[in-house]
C-alpha cells in the first residue's frame, strides 16, 4: 500500500517534458475493450488502499489502484454497496479502472450509473500536476464538475489517483421472476413496468425469457411477487452476477458482439443475430455479422449509438466521433488536460 | 443614452477577466442600447427587446437582491432560432450575454452585465413531449419545475428534484445551477434526473449533451454543463427523467433538547441502512420563525426539530417509520409526532419550505448561506457559528438538509445600519471557510455566482482554477457568456489574501507576495 502521489506526478512530468506517451493501466481487466497502444505502462496498482470510509456519511475514498473486490468487500462488511454494480470483467479490476471505463451493471436504470456516484477525484493531469475536484460530500456545486468528466474518459484526461464515491445501504432481500414471451412483448412489459412503482432493480430478455429482479424490504418484494405473477427463478442472484460479468454463454459467441445503447422504448432493431436485452430495453446486445455502418445507423435512428464490445479493435473502440461544435469542444478539453497528448494516446478514440 | 464604456463599469466582478474588459472597451463601447435593440429587431419582434430603464428594471437583480445591476439591453426570444440569432449577433459584436430563467437563484448567477445583453428564456415555456413509457419529458427551459410534475401527475409520475422555489423556478435554471431540494439524498440532484440537454454555444452553434440513451458517445459534457451557471452554453431544451410517484409518503416530526442529539439521530438513521426520502433539521430560531409564519404545529420550545420522511410502497413505509421512531427515541427525542394525514404532512413541509421567508419576517434582512459539511462535524460547526454569532452581534438561524449535509445558516441583519451588510458578508465568508476546513464545500446547491467568488479561492488551488478557466475557454473562447461569474481570476485570489495551500503546494508562486 502506498499513498505517495508525488512519484506518479514526477513520472508524468518527465513524460510530459520528453513527450513520451504513457499507457495508464489498472488491472488490465478491460484491455480487451479499450487499450492504448502506448509502450510505456504507468501501473496504478501500486497506488492502492482506502483513504477514508465513513459509513454514516455514505462516502468512501479509495486510491485508484485499489482492487475493486477489496472495496466491495469493505462496503459489504458495513452493510453497504456500490449500487451501480460495476462489471469487473476480470479478477484484477481496480477502482480507477471502474471510473475510467464508466461501465455500470444491471441496476443502472433504476439506481444510477458510476458517474452518478462519483463525488470527487484527486488526479494528475498531463503536465504532472496534482489536482483535486469535487469533494467528499453529496451536495457540491462549487466549480465545474470535473470529477464526473473523468468517468468514461478512459484515462485520456488525467491519471485518476483517489476517488470519492457515494455508497448506499445494501438491499436486504431480492427475488427474480421469469416469463416466457417474445421480444416485442418483453419490451412492452419492461416499458410499462418502468413507469409503475414496482421495486424493480434489474431486467433482462434473452432466449425467449424475460427476467426481472425485485429488490428491497422483504414485505415489499413479496407483495410485488404476488401481483406480478411470474415464475420464480431459483438462482436469480447467479443470473444477475453472470450477466454483470458477461459470463453467460452469449458473450462467448464467435461473432462480433455489439452493445447498442438507445431509447428504451425503441422497437426491436430488426437485425439478424442473437440478442440480449438489458436495462429495461435501453441496452440491446447483439452478436451479429452485420457491418458496423448498418448497426450504427440503426442505433442512431433509435436515439443512441453502437459500440463493438467483443471481437473489435481495442485501440480504436468507438467508431463514431462527435461532430461540429462538439468536436471542437472535445478537442479543446483534451488539449487542456493533456497538452502534449501523452495520456493514453489514441483513446478514447472519439476525438 | 450614454454608450456603454469602461467608465460605467463599476461592478467589481467585471475586472475579473481582463480579456472581457478589453473586448468591451474595444467593441460594445461603440454601440448604444438603441442601436443594439435595432439590430436585434431584424430577428426578434420589438416587443421582445427592452431598452428603456423602466422596462429593464425587473431584471436588475435575481434572488440575491443585495446585488443589483441594470442590464444594457434585455431580450426575450420566443424560439430557438431567435436565441441563436441573438447569440450570433452578440458574438460578432463581442457583447457579453447573461442567460436568465425565473431569476430565483440565490447567488447572483443571473446578475446582469452592465454592458451586456440579458437573455431571458422565460418565453420558451412549452412542454414539448411527454413519453410516459420512456419516463421522460422534453421541455423548454422556461418551464417551471413544478409544472413538469403537474403535467405528468395523471400518469402517476413526477419530477423528483424539488428546490424550495419550485413553484417559480424554471428547469433551465435548475440545470444551470444543478439544483437540489429536500429529497435529494434519495432521489439525487438535477444532474441525476436529466437525460439530454440541447442548446447553443456563445458563437450560436447548436450543441447537444447527453442523449435519449443511458450513455452517449464522447466525454460526459453533460456533467460539465449541469451546474455550469450559464458560463458554457445557453440551454434551449431539456429532456428530464420522471419517475413513478411513491404510493405512500409519511413524515415524522421529532423534537430534541439539544442540537447534538438531533445530529446524532441523523447519523444513526443513516448508519442503520435507512435512506429517508427527506431528512431535515431546523434549530430553535428557525423553528420559531417558521411556526409563527405557517402555524405548522412545530414544537417552539425544542432546541432542534427533525423532519423524517419515508416514501414508497405502504409496507416499506410502515417498516421504515417503525425503525426511525425507535432510533429517534433511543437518541433522546422529547417528542415524536407522525403527521396524521396528507394535509398535516404538507403542513409540516410547508413550514420547512417557508423557512427562508419566515426568517425574513422576523428580521429586516437576512443572508442565506449554502455550505455543505460532512455530517459528523455538525455539532462543532454549529458551535463555532454560535460563538461567531455572539461576537458579531448577529443572530443566525440554521436550516439543515441533514441527510446530505447541506447547511443553510441564515444571518439576520438590518441593511439600514451602516456597515451591517459588510459585517454580515464577513461572517458569511467565515462560515463558508469553516465548511471547507472541515472537509465540505462553499456551495451545496445555490451556486457560486458573484456571491461566493472569493471563497472559491479558499476551496480551490491555482491549478484547479486554471483548469476551470480552461473549460470555460473550451466552450466559449471569447469569454462572453456570463463573464466574471463562478470562477475567480488568480489575480483576485492573490489580492484577496485568501490563499488555499493545497497538498502543501503554494498557489500561484509566480505572483509576488507582500
Image (cartoon, helix red, strand yellow):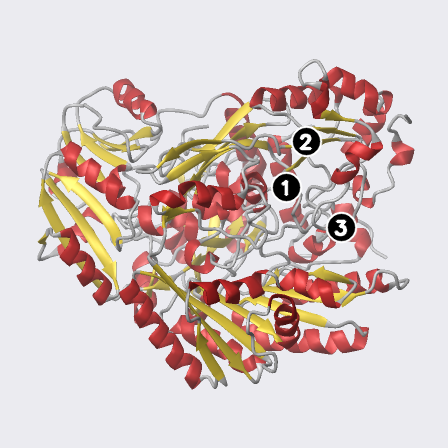
Q: Are marks 1 and 3 on the same chain?
A: yes
**Image side of residue B43 versus residue A24, left or right:** right
Instruction: Report the residue marked by disc 3.
Output: B65
Q: Are marks 2 and 3 on the same chain?
A: yes
Of residues B129 and B488, the one nearer the viewer is: B129
How many angstroms separate mark 1 from mark 3 (CA)? 14 Å
**Position of residue A200 measured from the top left corner of the image (x, y, whole percent):** 25, 52
* Chain under callout 1: B
Circles 2 and 3 in contact, beta carbons < 8 Å: no
Whether labels 1 and 2 belong to a single chain: the reply is: yes
Q: Of B463 and A297, which appears nearest the observer?
A: A297
Query: Would you call the spot at circle 2 few (<14 residues within 10 Å), some (14-19), or many (20 or more)?
Result: many
- Observer able to see residue B304: yes
- Dot in front, 1 or 2: 1
Q: Earlier in the sequence, mark 1 or mark 3?
A: 3
First reached walking from the N terminus: tag 1 or tag 2: 1
Distance between the Cα atoms at labels 2 and 3?
19 Å
Residue at 32 percent across and 49 percent down: it is A110
> Which residue lies at the image location 61% right of the left edge and 61% below the top edge?
B354
**Residue at the spot of label 2:** B119
- Whether tag 1 and tag 3 are in contact, CB under 8 A, the answer is no
Q: In the rendering, which numbered label is found on residue B102?
A: 1
Q: Is residue A245 visible?
A: no
Element type at mark 2: strand
Which of the marked residues, 2 or 3, is nearer the chain's N terminus? 3
The Cα–Cα distance between marks 1 and 2, rounded to whole angstroms, is 11 Å
Relative vertical location of residue A116 with respect to residue B256 in this rendering, above or below: above
Residue B175 in percent (x, y) is at 54, 42
Amino acid at each position: 500500500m502506498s499513498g505517495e502521489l508525488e512519484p506518479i506526478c514526477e513520472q508524468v512530468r518527465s513524460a510530459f517534458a520528453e513527450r513520451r506517451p504513457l499507457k495508464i493501466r489498472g488491472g488490465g481487466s478491460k484491455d480487451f475493450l479499450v487499450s492504448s497502444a502506448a509502450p510505456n505502462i504507468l501501473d496504478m496498482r501500486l497506488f492502492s488502499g482506502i483513504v477514508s470510509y465513513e459509513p454514516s456519511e455514505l462516502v468512501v475514498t479509495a486510491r485508484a489502484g485499489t482492487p475493486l473486490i477489496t472495496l466491495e468487500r469493505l462496503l459489504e462488511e458495513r452493510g453497504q454497496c456500490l449500487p451501480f454494480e460495476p462489471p469487473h470483467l476480470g479478477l484484477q479490476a481496480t477502482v480507477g479502472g471502474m471510473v475510467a471505463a464508466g461501465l455500470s451493471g444491471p441496476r443502472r436504470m433504476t439506481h444510477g450509473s458510476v458517474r452518478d456516484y462519483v463525488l470527487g477525484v484527486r488526479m494528475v493531469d498531463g503536465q504532472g500536476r496534482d489536482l483535486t475536484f469535487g469533494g467528499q460530500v453529496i451536495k457540491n456545486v462549487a466549480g465545474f464538475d470535473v470529477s464526473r468528466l473523468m468517468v468514461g474518459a478512459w484515462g485520456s484526461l488525467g491519471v485518476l489517483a483517489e476517488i470519492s464515491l457515494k455508497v448506499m445501504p445494501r438491499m436486504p432481500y431480492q427475488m427474480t421472476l421469469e416469463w416466457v414471451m417474445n421480444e416485442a412483448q418483453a419490451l412492452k412489459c419492461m416499458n410499462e413496468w418502468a413507469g409503475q412503482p414496482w421495486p424493480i432493480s434489474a431486467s433482462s430478455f434473452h432466449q425467449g425469457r424475460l427476467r426481472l429482479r425485485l429488490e428491497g424490504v422483504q414485505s415489499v418484494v413479496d407483495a410485488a411477487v404476488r401481483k406480478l405473477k411470474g415464475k420464480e427463478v431459483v438462482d436469480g442472484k447467479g443470473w444477475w452476477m453472470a450477466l454483470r460479468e458477461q459470463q453467460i454463454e452469449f458473450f462467448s459467441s464467435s461473432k462480433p458482439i455489439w452493445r447498442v445503447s438507445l431509447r428504451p422504448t425503441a422497437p426491436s432493431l430488426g437485425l439478424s443475430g442473437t440478442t440480449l436485452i438489458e436495462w429495461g430495453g435501453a441496452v440491446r446486445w447483439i452478436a451479429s455479422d452485420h457491418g458496423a455502418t448498418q448497426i450504427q445507423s440503426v442505433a442512431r435512428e433509435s436515439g443512441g449509438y453502437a459500440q463493438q464490445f467483443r471481437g473489435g479493435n481495442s485501440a480504436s473502440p468507438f467508431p463514431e466521433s462527435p461532430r461540429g461544435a462538439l468536436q471542437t469542444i472535445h478537442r479543446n478539453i483534451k488539449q487542456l488536460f493533456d497538452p502534449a497528448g501523452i495520456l493514453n494516446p489514441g483513446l478514447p478514440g472519439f476525438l | 443614452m450614454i454608450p456603454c464604456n469602461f467608465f460605467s463599469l463599476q461592478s467589481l466582478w467585471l475586472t475579473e477577466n481582463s480579456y472581457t474588459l478589453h473586448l468591451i472597451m474595444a467593441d460594445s463601447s461603440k454601440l448604444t442600447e438603441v442601436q443594439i435593440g435595432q439590430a436585434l429587431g431584424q430577428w426578434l419582434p420589438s416587443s421582445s427587446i427592452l431598452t428603456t430603464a423602466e422596462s429593464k428594471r425587473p431584471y436588475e437583480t435575481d434572488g440575491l437582491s443585495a446585488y443589483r445591476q441594470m442590464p444594457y439591453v434585455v431580450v426575450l426570444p420566443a424560439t430557438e432560432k431567435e436565441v441563436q440569432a441573438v447569440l450570433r449577433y452578440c458574438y460578432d459584436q463581442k457583447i457579453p450575454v447573461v442567460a436568465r430563467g425565473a431569476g430565483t437563484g440565490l447567488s447572483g448567477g443571473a446578475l446582469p452585465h452592465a454592458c451586456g445583453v440579458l437573455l431571458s428564456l422565460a418565453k420558451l415555456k412549452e412542454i414539448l413531449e411527454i413519453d410516459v413509457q420512456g419516463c421522460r419529458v422534453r421541455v423548454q427551459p422556461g418551464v417551471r419545475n413544478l409544472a413538469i410534475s403537474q403535467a405528468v401527475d395523471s400518469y402517476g409520475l413526477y419530477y423528483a428534484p424539488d428546490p424550495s422555489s419550485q413553484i417559480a423556478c424554471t428547469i433551465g435554471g435548475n440545470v444551470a445551477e444543478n439544483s437540489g431540494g429536500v429529497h435529494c439524498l434519495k432521489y439525487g440532484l438535477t444532474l441525476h434526473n436529466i437525460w439530454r440537454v440541447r442548446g447553443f454555444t456563445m458563437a450560436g452553434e447548436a450543441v447537444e449533451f447527453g442523449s435519449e440513451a443511458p450513455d452517449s458517445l464522447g466525454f460526459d459534457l453533460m456533467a460539465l454543463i449541469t451546474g455550469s451557471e450559464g458560463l458554457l452554453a445557453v440551454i434551449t431544451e431539456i429532456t428530464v427523467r420522471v419517475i413513478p410517484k411513491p404510493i405512500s409518503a409519511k413524515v415524522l416530526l421529532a423534537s430534541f433538547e439539544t442540537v447534538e442529539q438531533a445530529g446524532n439521530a441523523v447519523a444513526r438513521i443513516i448508519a442503520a441502512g435507512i435512506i429517508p426520502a427527506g431528512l431535515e433539521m431546523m434549530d430553535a430560531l428557525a423553528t420559531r420563525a417558521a411556526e409563527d409564519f405557517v402555524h405548522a404545529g412545530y414544537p417552539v420550545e425544542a432546541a432542534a426539530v427533525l423532519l423524517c420522511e419515508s416514501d414508497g410502497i405502504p409496507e416499506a413505509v410502515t417498516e421504515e417509520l417503525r425503525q426511525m421512531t425507535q432510533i429517534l427515541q433511543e437518541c433522546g427525542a422529547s417528542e415524536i409526532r407522525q403527521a396524521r394525514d396528507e394535509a398535516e404532512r404538507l403542513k409540516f413541509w410547508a413550514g420547512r419550505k417557508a423557512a427562508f421567508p419566515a426568517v425574513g419576517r422576523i428580521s429586516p434582512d437576512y443572508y442565506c448561506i449554502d455550505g455543505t459539511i460532512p455530517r459528523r462535524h455538525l455539532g462543532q460547526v454549529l458551535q463555532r457559528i454560535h460563538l461567531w454569532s455572539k461576537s458579531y452581534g448577529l443572530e443566525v438561524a440554521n436550516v439543515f438538509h441533514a441527510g446530505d449535509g447541506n447547511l443553510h445558516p441564515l444571518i439576520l441583519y438590518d441593511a439600514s445600519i451602516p456597515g451591517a451588510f459588510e459585517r454580515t458578508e464577513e461572517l458569511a465568508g467565515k462560515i463558508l471557510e469553516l465548511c471547507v476546513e472541515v472537509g465540505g464545500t462553499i456551495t451545496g446547491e445555490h451556486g457560486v455566482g458573484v456571491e461566493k467568488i472569493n471563497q472559491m479561492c479558499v476551496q480551490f488551488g491555482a491549478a484547479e482554477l486554471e483548469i476551470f478557466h480552461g473549460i470555460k475557454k473550451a466552450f466559449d473562447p471569447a469569454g462572453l457568456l456570463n463573464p466574471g461569474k463562478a470562477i475567480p481570476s488568480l489575480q483576485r485570489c492573490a489580492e484577496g489574501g485568501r490563499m488555499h495551500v493545497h497538498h502543501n503546494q503554494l498557489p500561484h508562486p509566480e505572483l509576488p507576495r507582500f
